[in-house]
Amino acid sequence: MDPELNLNSSSVIDDIHPCYKSYNATHTFTTNPSIICVLLYIFLSSLSVVTICGNFLVIISIIYFKQLQTPTNYLILSLAVADLLVGVLVFPLSMAFTVTSCLYHEDLFCKIRDSFDVSLCTSSILNLCCISVDRYYAVCQPLMYRTKINAQVSVIMILVSWGISALIGIGIIIAGFSQGTCEEMCSVDVVIANTIGPVLSFYLPAIIMLCIYLKIFLVAQKQVNSIENTAKSGASVSKMERKATKTLAIVMGVFLLCLTPYFICVVFQPLAYNPPPVPVIEMLNWLTLSNSMLNPLIYAFFYSWFRSAFRMIISGKIFQGDLANSKLI
């Protein structure tokens, strides 16, 4: 009886992920996936396709249509490239090598996944930060905008963003980034990787963006009050103010909603006595990646000229003639 009981207890399968099975501390992808597992991977594959298609439309629009080739849109182009690579590389790698599997069997592919994840997500965040700087000069210092922000400055900002992202991604992997808890005692490298990395790649850019957008809002409101002379202009300006406020609220709201929960978890999880379950970490990780899918909607779909460009690309009109100099409405 006792040996038989011990055998049964040792062969208990612990479900920690809908697509993974745990058997005697060995976590492998199930050979008989459940309906939940199949639906999950169909959903994640759909997110990847939408991310790739949305950002690809942004990239083609800016490259093809000369009207869209402005310093601001060069930054949006860089953001779209980073988000496109998230859809092409990070999404499939995260589906193949999940937090669940890498938590127990960290190998070369898991480190590659983490490196791409950190580098590309950081690049996306820093590009968002550069866009906020561009908007600051456009709204708060419009007379100096063309001298402060031009094509050369945009290229420098893009190169700096990608350079810093690569360094942070490589540094975190070398230091030993951890998505799990420390069983006994955290090494100094792990603590540094889980604190300095998120501070440089998320918290600092987020604070900068919040301060910049707050300044933009205050300046825009001051400009509204200064030119609000007639009822007609007042109504028009009030409408513009509401639209600007709504756009800024959506930009920052989606950004913080997608990334803040995961980065809070990253900082405190290795030191937590009772860490959150692995499925929670998985969900927060995918919520962070979904920001790359939403960026094209926020930064491109809200503008009429991008919508016109998308319609011409999707309908195939750009293959019927030279429309690069077309006036986009």
Image: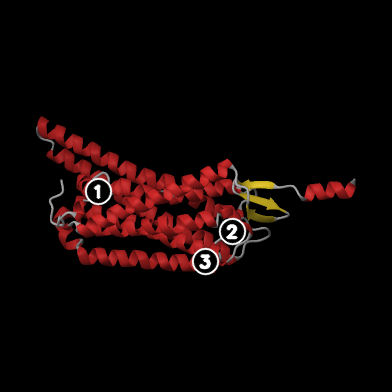
Which amino acid is tagged 1?
A: Phe
Q: Quadrant of the N terminus?
A: top right
**Category of crowding for the residue at label 1, using alpha-carbon neighbours closer than 10 angstroms: few (below 14), some (14–19), many (at least 20):** some
Q: Is residue 36 above or below residue 162?
A: above
Tell which tag, 1 or 3, sits nearer the viewer: 1
Q: Are marks 3 and 2 in contact (CB under 8 Å)?
A: no
Which amino acid is tagged 3?
A: Ile
User: Can residue 144 be seen here?
Assistant: yes
Of callouts 1 and 3, which one flags the residue occurring earlier in the amino acid sequence? 3
Furthest toward the top, the residue is: 231
**Category of crowding for the residue at label 3, using alpha-carbon neighbours closer than 10 angstroms: few (below 14), some (14–19), many (at least 20):** some
**Residue that appears at 25% across and 63% down:** 154
**Residue that appears at 47% across and 48% down:** 44
- Residue 115 image position (x, y, % from top left): 48, 64
**Residue that appears at 24% across and 48% down:** 310
- Residue 269 image position (x, y, % from top left): 58, 52
- Residue 298 image position (x, y, % from top left): 31, 46
- Residue 7 image position (x, y, % from top left): 82, 50
Picture quadrant where residue 307 is located? top left
Which amino acid is tagged 2?
A: Cys
Instruction: Quickly name the residue at label 1.
Output: 310
Instruction: Quickly name the residue at label 3.
Output: 173
In front: 52, or 16? 52
> Which type of secondary structure does the marked residue at label 1 adopt?
helix
